[in-house]
């Protein structure tokens, strides 16, 4: 198969973990006989430095041309006080919207060998296995009107939380279809005791649920959900929620597994004429400028994002499975980065995954 993939390393540790992810991508493609066609583009702070904008037209063109996009992370502290349109994050929001990847899948899963790295007591974290499905191209992140208006005592800032029925429907279908292949349970998270926006969300999710009688649906208010995630994470199978709630809850979910560095994410849009789903794949973690350039970054989130890409965009489940098994054997071997209490550097972990892939593939 020919895999046409755009690589966007981005900023900070994004570039470091992407190097390892690409190593693994090359290794798995070689071993399974796929032909890689890689292109590389600029996004975020590096793009602002080189082109004056966080999401250059050239990057947009490359992304629309590719079958899938693999991203590192964006964000640099020097832009902290820049206007919103000149911040690295705007590049990320721009590419999500350009590709219309409306469903962001963030799997949270505990690994036995990492239980001691989790901030939760072992018996709470052990066995947790959920996927957070976060709506990604609507809500407060994109709603208009938005902006800061007026001056002095009249100065006011506005953001708009807006969802249309079709936007809620399409992401709900993704959640229910996913749950149907898992433990058949969707928990929809909203703030319907206060927000009209959440009332529509809840109503539409209930309607979509009727089409999936085999999947159980429950609803949870977002504040309670934040609490249940640490009290009883095992109760969740598929957690469906809107953009901002999903942003917050997925960081909380991320640490249940021991380190946010572990988590991959897949952002999926509509089917392309080729039959593949449009997809943008990125680790959940950010650019972590404080540890950039030191070889400390955990590449598992990025490597897992490669596996998710092979699975969701290209339907290559065997290849994805081989990566997951290789990652697990590296975790078991203890060749991990400092966030997981190991002493390996980023490159060594990437190499270890590639070595382990060879063994995994040979054994199949
Ligand atoms: C994430 C990040 C982004 C978001 C930022 C960098 C804009 O936190 O992917 O979770 O808020 O969506
Ligand atoms: Mg976030």
Image (spheres, rainbow, N blue to C red):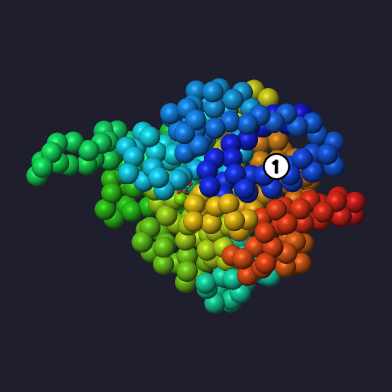
Rendering coords of residue 75 (x, y %): 46, 45
Name the foreground residue: 358 vs 1: 358
Q: Is residue 2 left or right of residue 260?
A: right
Which residue appears at 62% of the width and 39% of the height? 70
Residue 132 seen in the figure: no
Quarter that holds the N terminus: top right
Which element is circle 1 on? Answer: helix
Residue 344 vs 15, above or below: the answer is: below
Looking at the image, which residue is at 73% across and 44% down?
A: 23
Q: Is residue 245 left or right of residue 236?
A: left
Image spot of residue 268 (x, y percent): 56, 38
Asked if the residue at label 1 sits under 8 Å from ligand 1, the reply is no
Residue for badge 1: 22
The image shows residue 213 at horizontal and vertical percentages of 55, 49
Q: Residue at x 32, y 44 (%)?
A: 81
213 or 98: which is nearer to us?
98
The part of the image, by quadrant, that contains residue 129 is bottom right
């Amino acid at each position: 198969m020919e895999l046409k993939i755009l690589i966007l390393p981005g900023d900070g540790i994004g570039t470091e973990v992407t190097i390892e992810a690409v190593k693994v991508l090359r290794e798995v493609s070689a071993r399974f006989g796929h032909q890689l066609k890689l292109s590389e583009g600029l996004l975020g702070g590096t793009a602002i430095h080189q082109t004056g904008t966080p999401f250059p037209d050239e990057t947009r063109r490359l992304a629309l041309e590719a079958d899938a996009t693999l991203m590192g992370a964006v964000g640099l502290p020097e832009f902290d006080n820049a206007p919103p349109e000149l911040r690295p994050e705007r590049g990320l929001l721009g590419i999500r919207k350009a590709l219309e990847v409306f469903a962001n899948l963030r799997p949270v899963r505990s690994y036995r060998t990492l239980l001691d790295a989790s901030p939760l007591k072992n018996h709470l974290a052990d066995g947790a296995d959920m996927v957070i499905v976060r709506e990604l191209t609507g809500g407060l992140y994109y709603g208009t009107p938005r902006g800061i208006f007026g001056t002095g005592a009249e100065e006011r800032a506005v953001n708009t939380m807006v969802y249309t029925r079709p936007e809620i429907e399409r992401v709900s279908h993704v959640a229910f279809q996913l749950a149907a292949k898992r433990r058949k349970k969707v928990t929809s998270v909203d703030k319907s005791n206060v927000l009209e926006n959440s009332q529509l969300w809840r109503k539409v999710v209930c309607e979509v649920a009727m089409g999936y009688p085999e999947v159980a649906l429950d609803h949870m208010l977002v504040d309670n959900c934040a609490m249940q995630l640490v009290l009883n994470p095992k109760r969740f199978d598929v957690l469906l929620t809107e953009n901002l709630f999903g942003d917050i809850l997925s960081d909380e979910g991320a640490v249940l597994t021991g380190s946010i560095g572990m988590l991959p994410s897949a952002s999926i849009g509509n089917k392309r004429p080729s039959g593949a789903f449009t997809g943008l794949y990125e680790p959940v973690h950010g650019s972590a400028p404080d540890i950039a350039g030191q070889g400390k970054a955990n590449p598992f989130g990025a490597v897992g994002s490669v596996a998710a890409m092979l699975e969701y965009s290209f339907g290559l489940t065997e290849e994805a499975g081989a990566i997951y098994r290789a990652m697990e054997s590296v975790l078991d071997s203890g060749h991990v980065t400092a966030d997981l209490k190991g002493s390996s550097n980023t490159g060594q972990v990437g190499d270890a995954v590639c070595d382990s892939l060879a063994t995994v593939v040979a054994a199949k």
